[in-house]
């Protein structure tokens, strides 16, 4: 939805009031007994302990660059300033970035270096700063944001997550991220358990995206069609309907808004350990994707996908 002229990102006001720095300190305190995600590991990451995600104290970055393969509303003409964070709290057997998410491929950086990445991407003309898989590094990201905002960062932040986030973490980010982009991977417990080792994921993601929607609403764009604020949801169509697309779109349309931006993705292909699971060891058929689109349209959704 075009919102016309937009003001600065909401974190600017939090910086001016001192609230951003207060949140950074509060979140950093959680690293001594980490419960940033539903794994609820309770490890002391300040002392180098690591939980399910594999992350320690220092943020780890795999890459940072202007990305032109994201949603058009994020990319525009200057690209989305994408910062890929290493490690992940989900154990997806079909992970397309397993060298990063599971293998830990990346470089440890300080919060000040992370702030420099943000400023550099803004200077290169990116429309936003897009943190990919940020959940386990939220305290370090917010700490870096304090520095970056003081140095002139003034473009929206994107929270690009697998959706397995603690509701407390998402609430603590109110007014910091103007754009949320969660995956909605599975609607049912059995596949969430089998393919991600997260049987509680369906309940978690519904609570998480409801809170995200409460904070930022449906996607709003400026006069050039560039996202300024709002919720984008990604849903990967899986072989055999295993993702529960019918339930996913019904929840979004019924509980959030029929104006919600939903990217129905057709690019599933077997990666990582997917070959060990015969039912997902293949690409989806064109007919499966077409059926997903029809289901979404029947539910009243229309933004974010074609077909």
Image (cartoon, rainbow, N blue to C red):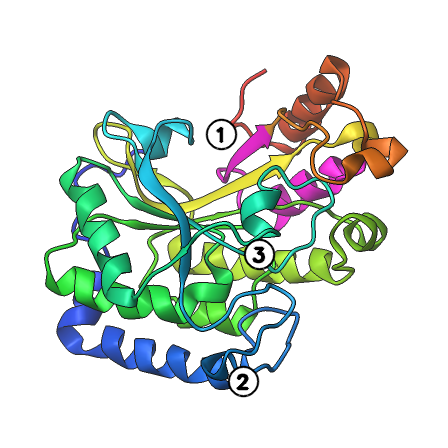
Quickly name the residue at label 2: 33
Quickly name the residue at label 3: 88
In the image, is residue 261 part of the stretch drawn in magenta?
yes
Q: Residue 104 placed where, x, y %? A: 54, 54
Task: Give the alpha-carbon distance from disc 3 to disc 2, as whole Å.
Answer: 18 Å
Per the rendering, the mark at residue 34 is none
Q: Residues within 10 Å of mark 1 (few under 14, many from 20)?
A: some
- Mark yes or no: residue 146 visible: yes
Q: Is residue 230 above or below residue 137?
A: above
Q: Residue 6 placed where, x, y %? A: 19, 45
Q: Earlier in the sequence, mark 1 or mark 2?
A: 2
Quickly name the residue at label 1: 303
306 lies left or right of 271:
left
At 77% from the left and 52% from the top, the residue drawn is 192
At 56% from the left and 78% from the top, the residue drawn is 49
Task: Give the alpha-carbon distance from disc 3 to disc 1, as whole Å.
Answer: 28 Å
Q: Residue 217 placed where, x, y %? A: 41, 51
79 lies left or right of 206:
left
Q: Foreground: 36 or 16?
A: 36
* Magenta residues (range): 242-264
The quarter of the image holding the C terminus is top right
Q: Is residue 300 above or below residue 167?
A: above
Helix, strand or loop at mark 1: loop
Q: Quadrant of residue 209?
A: bottom right
The quarter of the image holding the N terminus is top left
Q: Earlier in the sequence, mark 3 or mark 1?
A: 3
């Amino acid at each position: 939805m075009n919102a016309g002229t937009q003001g600065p990102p909401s974190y600017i006001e939090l910086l001016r009031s001192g609230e951003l720095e207060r949140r950074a300190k509060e979140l950093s305190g959680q690293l001594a007994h980490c419960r940033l995600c539903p794994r609820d590991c309770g490890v002391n990451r300040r002392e180098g302990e690591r939980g399910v995600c594999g992350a320690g104290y220092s943020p780890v970055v795999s890459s940072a660059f202007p990305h032109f393969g994201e949603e058009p509303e994020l990319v525009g003409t200057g690209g989305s300033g994408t910062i890929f964070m290493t490690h992940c709290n989900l154990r997806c057997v079909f992970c397309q970035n397993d060298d990063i998410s599971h293998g830990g491929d990346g470089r440890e950086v300080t919060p000040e270096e992370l702030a420099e990445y943000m400023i550099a991407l803004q200077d290169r003309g990116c429309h936003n700063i897009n943190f990919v898989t940020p959940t386990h590094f939220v305290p370090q990201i917010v700490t870096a944001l304090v520095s970056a905002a003081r140095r002139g960062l003034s473009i929206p932040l994107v929270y690009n997550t697998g959706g397995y986030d603690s509701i407390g973490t998402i609430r603590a980010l109110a007014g910091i991220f103007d754009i949320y982009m969660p995956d909605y991977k599975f609607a049912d417990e059995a596949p969430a358990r089998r393919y991600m080792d997260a049987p509680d994921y369906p309940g978690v993601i519904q609570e998480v995206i409801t809170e995200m929607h409460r904070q930022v609403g449906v996607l709003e764009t400026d006069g050039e069609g560039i996202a300024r604020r709002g919720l984008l949801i990604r849903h990967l169509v899986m072989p055999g309907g295993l993702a529960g697309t019918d339930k996913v779109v019904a929840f979004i349309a019924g509980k959030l808004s029929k104006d919600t931006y939903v990217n129905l993705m057709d690019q599933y292909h077997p990666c990582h350990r997917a070959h060990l699971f015969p039912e997902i060891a293949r690409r989806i058929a064109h007919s499966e994707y077409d059926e997903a689109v029809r289901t979404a349209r029947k539910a009243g959704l229309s933004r974010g996908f074609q077909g």
